[in-house]
Amino acid sequence: MVKAAVTPTIGSSNSLRRPILRSEANTISRQSLATCMPSRLFATASEADAAIEEIQELYSNAKDEFEMAAEETEKKTVYAEDDRAAAQEELQKLKDTYDRMLQQSAPDVASEIKNRVGQRIRELDNAIKALEESAQED
């Protein structure tokens, strides 16, 4: 025996309304999901997410190196030059991985990667260049 749901109903007027059976509700949900969400969307999202996760880890390393380099450069310590070089090296690893991911990915995945992390990479690149320029002026 199939139990009827209490709140959802089908029909536009009160006299024509009938309860939606739980089996109907589940079937409708599955059918809508199957027709609205093509399987390619799931594959693209996971491909982009995997690439972005790898890029994110490298970005975090490069940003940490930049922050240490900025602090040491501001204090004008003996470690400043080496820290700037380490920041530049980490940034280069990040940019190489980012470019490789864009080239090896499908166009829709590459677009997703660009949209989600491209701006942050450019900002970090510009910050490291500005830090190097400020160190040269001193």
Image: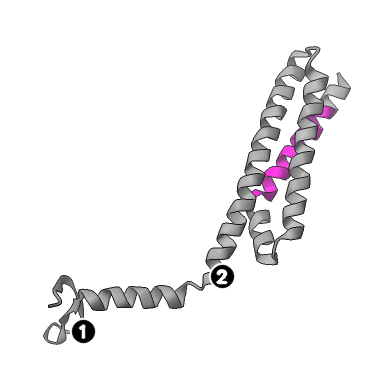
Residue 137 left/right relative to 69: right
Task: Judge the density around disc 1: few (<14), some (14-19), many (≥20) Cα neighbours within 10 Å.
Answer: few
Residue 74 drawn at (x, y percent)? 74, 18
**As drawn, 63 above or below 121:** above
Q: Amino acid at mark 2?
A: Arg
Where, by quadrant of the figure, is residue 83 drawn? top right
Residue identifier under label 2: 40
Count all numbered tags in the image, as a single digit. Answer: 2
Residue 101 left/right relative to 29: right
Q: Quadrant of the C terminus?
A: top right
Residue identifier under label 1: 11
Q: Quadrant of the N terminus?
A: bottom left
Please report the residue visible at 36 percent of the width from the left and 74 percent of the height from the top: 30
**As drawn, 124 above or below 74:** below
Residue 122 drawn at (x, y percent)? 74, 44
Check if mark 2's residue and mark 1's residue have beta carbons within 8 Å. Answer: no
Where, by quadrant of the figure, is residue 15 drawn? bottom left
Secondary structure, mark 2, is helix
**As drawn, 20 above or below 89:** below
Distance from label 2 to label 1 (Cα)?
Answer: 35 Å
**91 or 127: nearer the viewer:** 91
> What are the residue bounds of the magenta stretch?
116-132
Q: Main secondary structure of the magenta part?
A: helix
Residue 68 is inside the magenta segment? no
Residue 120 is inside the magenta segment? yes
Please report the residue visible at 64 percent of the width from the left and 36 percent of the height from the top: 60
Residue 106 drawn at (x, y percent)? 69, 65
Q: Amino acid at mark 1?
A: Gly
Please report the residue visible at 76 percent of the width from the left and 37 percent of the height from the top: 91
**80 or 27: nearer the viewer:** 27
